Amino acid sequence: AEKVKERNELRDAFRQKEREFNAAIAEQRKIRAEKFAEERAARQAEYEKTRRLRQVEKLDEQPHLQEMTLIEQSILFCKSLTQTKETEEKKEKREIQHDLKDGMEVLAKKEDREEFYFVPTAKKKGKSKNKG
């Protein structure tokens, strides 16, 4: 009976120490979890801040920017086509008076000169279509 009593006391002491140890470990886990939660909240706040900044920048951008630039380019192209026709119509030929002295003559413009082309004497040989 004495040995049983001694065994029970030892077991109770062991259980008490075990509970204290488990409580200490649980306290450490709790502190670690709180620290992690604080860090996560800080990261989440930073992420939200950057996301809101991106949304604000997105609002500054014009919608349909690509389509608008395409339309502007086509308008400019059409205007350039119509302007060249108008300038050609407005161009008038004017005669220039040259003060020529004896023995001088004015050369014609390159566009106005007549060009002579030589006719080729030999014909090109065609490729043979028969392949052996």
Image: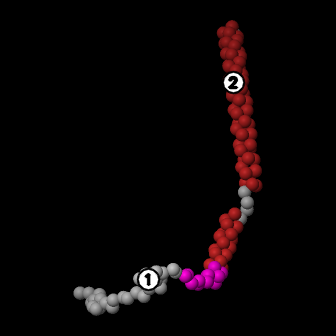
Q: Which residues are magenta?
A: 86-97
The residue drawn where x is 72% and y is 22% is: 23
Q: Is residue 107 visible?
A: no
Q: Quadrant of the N terminus?
A: top right
- Residue plotted at (73% across, 62% down): 63
Task: From this view, report whether residue 119 is shown above or below residue 67.
Answer: below
- Quadrant location of the C terminus? bottom left
Q: Earlier in the sequence, mark 2 or mark 1?
A: 2
Above or below residue 17? Residue 77 is: below
Pointer 2 with pointer 1, Cβ within 8 A = no
- The residue identified by callout 2 is 28
- Pinpoint residue 37: horizontal percent, then vertical percent: 72, 34
The residue tagged 1 is 102
- Is residue 34 shown above or below 103? above
Q: Amino acid at mark 1?
A: Asp
Colouring scheme, one of rainbow, by chain, secondary structure, one colour? secondary structure
What residue lies at 65% left-to-right and 77% top-to-bottom? 83
Alpha carbons under labels 2 and 1: distance apart: 116 Å
Q: Quadrant of residue 131?
A: bottom left
Nearer the observer, 103 or 58: 103
Kindly indicate the quadrant of the structure image that contains residue 117.
bottom left
As drawn, is 119 to the left or to the right of 63?
left
Q: Is residue 114 left or right of residue 55?
A: left
Which residue extends farthest front? 102
Q: Amino acid at mark 2?
A: Gln
Q: Residues within 10 Å of mark 2 (few under 14, many from 20)?
A: few
Depicted 68 relative to depicted 47: above or below: below
Residue 127 or 43: which is nearer the viewer?
A: 127
SS assignment at label 2: helix
